[in-house]
Amino acid sequence: MNIRGLIDRTTRTFAQEGLPTPRLDAEVLLAACLQTDRSEFYIHPEREVPPDRRRRFARWVGRRRRGQPVAYITGEKEFWSLPLAVGPQVLVPRPETEILVEEVLRLASSLPADPRILEVGVGSGAVSIALATELPRARIAATDISPDALALARVNARRHGVDGRIALMAGDLFEPVRGPFDLVVSNPPYIPEGSYDGLPVEVRCEPRLALLAGPDGTDVHRRLIADGGRYLKAGGWLCLEMGEGQGGRLTAALEKAGYTDIVRRKDYGGRERVIRARWR
């Protein structure tokens, strides 16, 4: 069977399963299986797929039909144009989180030339690695409660040549670090616990600890806000990703804790995605 036939058949299969992006999923899986770029499919659609690759592709299609994220199947996801190794020990990096990176870079002009930055909950390393590539003089510390996530972050940092500029530490939130920092950034869990059963199957494949945060999804944000001032320099910034509908509650929490210059920013889908504030 050739490339066009495999993609068309798999697209129909994924569409029947109700997957949201059936053709894209089929193309990404086949490209990874063939270790090629998707553009090759449009240049050489009649290329025959060797039997051993067809068998591997069939196994991958089966895993996708069972709800596994495409990135877990291929073992890789692109973030900020950087390919990153991913697996079930971490959240799959999402395009919306690039807004968090953009917001930190917007603040860069207000930071020292060699800013001290902390990421809480580093996961795969996506945010810290993107910041390290964009801010070559930054000194970055990053924490995570999961040793497996930290191990993967080390692999990704080494892959992109920034492992010498990111200090990875195990512990809960601020536990392993000493301040003060010029900026603290985090993409914490923000899904309400009661919403878990309604999540897509592929999201429920991701680490539950990295998804859920109490009744309204802001438990971890509130801890970061409450403790952040002890780890920020005067005038330092706290920059957080958040879920839809959480902006008002987090703004109130920030104001109560003494933060100023609070700004909420929408992602490119029109949903409030990032909130940032300055420590008094």
Image (tube, rainbow, N blue to C red):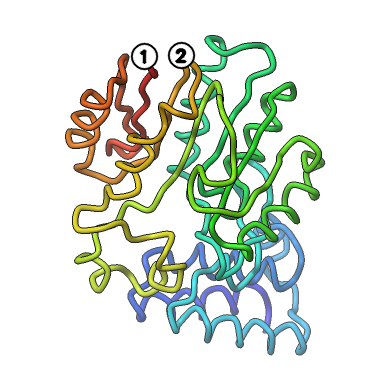
- The mark that comes first in sequence, 2 or 1, is 2
Q: Is residue 274 above or below residue 159?
A: above
Q: Which mark is residue 153?
A: none
Amino acid at the residue labelled 1:
Arg
Residue 22, image x and y in percent? Answer: 44, 69
Amino acid at the residue labelled 2:
Ala
Instruction: Tell me the SS state at disc 2.
Output: strand
Instruction: Please report contact status of discs 2 and 1: CB closer than 8 Å, yes or no.
Output: yes
Residue 157, image x and y in percent? Answer: 74, 47
> Which residue position holds label 1?
280
> Which residue position holds label 2?
234
The residue that appears at 74% across and 25% down in the rendered structure is 136
Camera-side residue: 206 or 226? 226
Q: Looking at the rendering, which quadrant does residue 228 occupy? A: top left
| 261 sits to left or right of 154 | left
Q: Residues within 10 Å of mark 2 (few under 14, many from 20)?
A: some
Quadrant assignment for the C terminus: top left
Q: Looking at the rendering, which quadrant does residue 109 occupy? A: top right
Residue 34, image x and y in percent? Answer: 74, 71
Q: Looking at the rendering, which quadrant does residue 1 occupy? A: bottom right
The residue that appears at 61% across and 43% down in the rendered structure is 142
Residue 9, image x and y in percent? Answer: 51, 80
Q: Is residue 92 above or below residue 249?
A: below
